[in-house]
Amino acid sequence: MSHSVENRFFAIVCGALLIFVAPLFVLFLFLSSERAEKEIKDHISVLLVANAQALAKPLWDLDEDSVTQISATTVAEGAIVKVNVRDLSGQLDVTQSTIPRSYKGLLESVARPIIYNGVDGAKNLGTITVYYPALGLFDGLKNEEIVFISIFIFAVLTVFGAALIGNRIFIIQPLMRLTHAVEATRRLGSRHHVDWQSNDEMGRLASSFNDMQSKLEREETELKLAHRRATDTYNLTPAMLFSLDKDDCIAAVSDYWLAATGYARSDVVGRKFASLVLPESREIYTERKRSRPDSAARLDVTVKFLCRDDRVMDVLILETTAIQDGQSLSVMTDVTDLKQSEDRNLRQAITDHLTGLLNRQGFETALDAKINEADLRKRELACLFVDLDRFKWINDNMGHAAGDAALRELVSRMQARLVPGDIAARLGGDEFAILLLAEDAEKRAFDMAARIAELFETPFGGDARLSASIGIAIYPRHAANAAELLLKSDIAMYAKKRDGKNGAQIFDNSMLDDSRRRAELESYIEGGLSDDWFEAHLQPIVNIDDRSIAGFEALMRLHHPQKGILPPARIIDVAEETGSIVRIGNRVMEKAISHFARLSRLDGMQDTYLAINFSPLQFESGLPVRIAALLSRHDIRPERIVVEITEAVLMDDNPETRTVINEICRYGCRIALDDFGTGYSSLSYINRFPVDIIKIDQSFIRAINDTASDVSAKSRMLVESITTLSHKMNCTVIAEGIETEEECATLRTMGLDYGQGYLFHRPQHPNDLLKALAGPRADYLSAVAQAS
């Protein structure tokens, strides 16, 4: 390397001399030569003129000796080496030469005519030609010029030599030392330093190189220490670490990996890792990178790994690819126990813990699989939606333990009727579903429904009798997917419940109309809650003797912007099924109490009361506080509020509900039992619960004057009995649905306290009622009579 740098420097200096100095030197020689040649030519021209004049007479006389003598004199001049004199007649041709025979150079010649001026005028007698050597570049130099050139060449050579020596001392020598240090570092692996100190660039280069060597030496030491620590960590870490090359062959494994798998390092290094994975999960492993081609991505996959002793481990492999030269670092974790736990949890997640059947989540998965099987085998799939009738009665009267036992017994009986391939699931509560795959799925479904009906012929738990409503839907006849099939079987089941329960019903498209109407009502309910369509209409309750207003009943109404007021009964049913009845009830209660406060400001209305209907779902722990807050806000005494409940609330006999009712009574509100006489009417409720008012259902009121005497007599007897017993128990009695004067007169003779119905007042918007009550009493009663 040093010779190469020095030679290049020498070549550069020589090139500089050739480019810049040599042309100047050549130019100087050329100009000197030009000057010398001009001087010679001028001198020869003078000689030729003189000699031509001197030769004119001898040549005219043909005096050869004189011609020869003059020619010799001419040749004797230093610059001329040859002279030739020739007359025109050719009689005389004299040549004089001093050119040595060894001379090989070029000669330059100059000729001049010889003119003789005689009596007859000028005559051309001949020519004289002189020859002189052609001058070279150095021939025209003078002594002082030769001295100057010598000094110039010496100076150039001195500078040239000094540059070479300086280059060798100050550049080549430190570079050679630097080269030796680099070569020694490369060959020996140790960090050699350059022994050179100076204040120039080479000194700084050597210092920087030495600093770099020192830093690299420290870094190498640290790197070796880190590598030793990494190796120790790799082998001593209690984790199964391994590395793969770009061909997915094992490049390295940790000691813990070897201890856990039982392999020797020599047995696995260089081996395809996929060969240690069981065939059933090998494809999952080999496809891990194809699905995520990003070479820097973190990959994870769970596979079954075969150990040396033929044990199979479920392992989770976390792999970070392309760490260096295509190699990857991976950690393999034994998740066998976790996998078994996951499988167990999955089974628990899709299994009903009470019956051992699939739950809803497991059923939905199985339903998708069965639909795919039906498509492949070109068969139909029947879905039976089974809902138990009167199961709530068992829970309420015999306890939940008895209900659970009945469900387990039912499932045991039902599984005996299933064949391999049938799937049964408990969707929740007392709802079950069965999937049947068959060529004629409808026939198979009704056969299964008949078998299920046979299950209920024998009582459960001794004397508990149940029945089932079954809805049937067929794929693909009724549904195009799993969700639709389950929905339509559910719709068919509800259609059977509405049709009398205890039996099977196959889906029909007409059932969708009921479902659409229900969905429409649900949307109206949600719209009413969000846009405040719900209103509280008030219907006065009058003293049956003088028809003075004793109170008001708040009735829920949904006023749709386009459809007007919708029938409340269906809305209440749907709201109780969806649970939105609580929000509706709270909204109606707030508006009713607000309107009642306005009515109470009218003359004669200060002692009236407000009856509010409550659904069983509304009896939450916060209800007494809500009522108290509203009454306090509007300054209404608690005894002026009547909470109307149905027998369903009392039949439930829920301790929480009983606590809420007792708190409402302690606060001062009164309790009214609505629609008494329907359902499981029992006077024991009056004794067991704090009931203040009994409202006899309108069905009994309409029958007291029935054209059939036996119906009329029985109805009157029931009404009189209820009234008498209620009075004995200090309860006020109200008759609902009075529409004729005849009914009113009959009830008055029976001793009822209050009446309510279209005969007296229709339910009205509070604003209309407020205007009517604020006007003249006679006008209002006339308007009421016309309306009735």
Image (cartoon, helix red, strand yellow):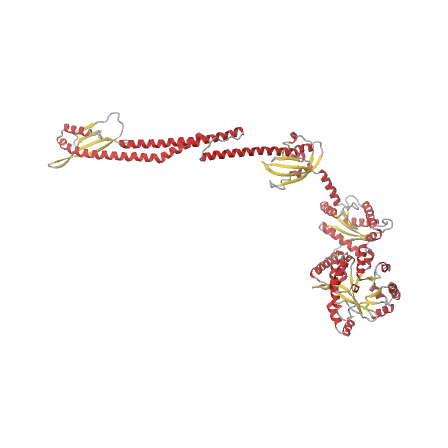
In the figure, is residue 225 to the left or right of 464? left
The residue furthest top is 101
Which quadrant holds residue 270? top right
Q: Point out residue 272 in the picture as x, y percentages from the top left corner.
A: 64, 33
Q: Point out residue 445 in the picture as x, y percentages from the top left corner.
A: 78, 49
Q: Point out residue 750 in the picture as x, y percentages from the top left corner.
A: 87, 68
In the figure, is residue 217 to the left or right of 763? left
Which quadrant holds residue 338? top right
Q: Point out residue 128 in the picture as x, y percentages from the top left corner.
A: 19, 32
User: Height in image: 62 above or below 603?
Assistant: above
* Relative depth, front residue between 454 and 726: 726
Res. 567 in view: no
* Relative depth, front residue between 387 and 302: 302
User: Height in image: 153 above or below 425?
Assistant: above
| Residue at (62% x, 36% y) in the render | 329
Res. 343 in view: yes
In the figure, is residue 328 to the left or right of 583? left
Quadrant of the image containing the C terminus:
bottom right
User: Height in image: 715 above or below 165?
Assistant: below
* Relative depth, front residue between 511 and 578: 578
